[in-house]
C-alpha cells in the first residue's frame, strides 16, 4: 500500500454544504496566505481572498490586529459569512472591500471587535430588514471606522 505524505484536510464551501478535501502541501499553502508579523501582535494577510482572511482570523489571538500586506488592494468575495469569534481588529487600510452575492450575510460576529478601513458591499437584505453586513451577537460591541 502506498503511503500518502504531506496531505492536510480542509473544508471547502459547496453551495450550502461543506466538502472535506485532502490537499497536498496544505500547510505550506496556508503559510503563504498568512504570515505573523515580527511584533507578534499583528497577523499579516498576503493575499486578498476569502480563504486568506479566514485563515488570518483563525491564526489571530485575542487582541491581535489583522492587516493586509503593503500594496495589497482588492475585493474579497464572501461566498458565505466570515466568522469573527475573537476580540481582534481587522484593518483593511482603506484598500479592501468585502463583497457578498446579495444572498448571505458578510460577517457573523460573536465577540467584540474593531473593523477599520474596510468597505462592505452587497450583503443580504430581506424585506423585514434583517441581514446586511451581518449578524452581531447579543451584548457584543463592534467598532467600525
Image (cartoon, rainbow, N blue to C red):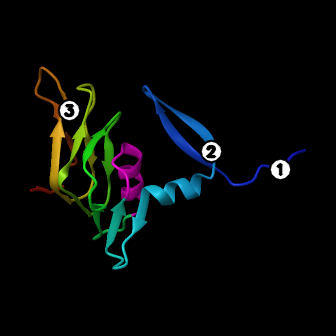
Vertical side of 62 occupied by 38: above or below: below
Q: Residue at x 19, y 51 (%)?
A: 95
Q: Which residue is disc 2 drawn over?
A: 23
Q: Quadrant of residue 133?
A: top left
Find residue 67 and report its image quarter.
Answer: bottom left
The quarter of the picture where the N terminus appears is: top right
User: In the shown orientation, is residue 9 left or right of residue 104?
Assistant: right
In the displayed structure, does residue 10 sit left or right of residue 136?
A: right
Identified at 39% across, 51% down, the residue is 52
Residue 120: x, y in percent? 17, 41
Q: Which mark is residue 3?
A: 1
Mark 3 in CB contact with mark 1 (< 8 angstroms): no
Q: Mark 3, mark 1: which one is toward the viewer?
A: 1
Q: Residue at x 33, y 48 (%)?
A: 48
- What is the residue that sits farthest to the bottom in this orientation? 39
Q: Does the magenta-highlighted stretch encompass residue 42? A: no
* Residue nearer the viewer, 14 or 68: 68
Q: Earlier in the sequence, mark 1 or mark 2?
A: 1
* Disc 3: CA contacts within 10 A as few (<14), some (14-19) or many (>=20): many
- Residue placed under numbered mark 3 in the picture: 123
Amino acid at each position: 500500500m502506498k503511503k500518502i505524505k504531506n496531505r492536510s484536510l480542509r473544508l471547502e464551501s459547496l453551495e450550502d454544504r461543506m466538502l472535506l478535501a485532502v490537499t497536498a502541501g496544505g500547510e505550506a499553502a496556508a503559510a503563504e496566505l498568512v504570515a505573523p508579523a515580527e511584533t507578534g501582535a499583528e497577523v499579516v494577510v498576503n493575499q486578498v481572498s476569502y480563504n486568506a482572511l479566514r485563515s488570518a482570523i483563525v491564526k489571530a489571538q485575542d487582541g491581535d490586529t489583522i492587516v493586509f500586506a503593503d500594496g495589497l488592494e482588492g475585493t474579497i468575495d464572501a461566498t458565505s459569512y466570515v466568522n469573527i469569534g475573537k476580540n481582534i481588529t481587522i484593518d483593511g487600510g482603506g484598500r479592501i472591500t468585502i463583497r457578498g452575492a446579495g444572498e448571505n450575510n458578510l460577517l457573523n460576529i460573536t465577540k467584540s471587535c474593531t473593523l477599520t478601513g474596510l468597505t462592505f458591499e452587497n450583503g443580504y437584505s430581506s424585506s423585514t430588514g434583517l441581514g446586511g453586513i451581518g449578524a452581531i451577537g447579543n451584548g457584543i460591541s463592534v467598532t467600525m471606522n
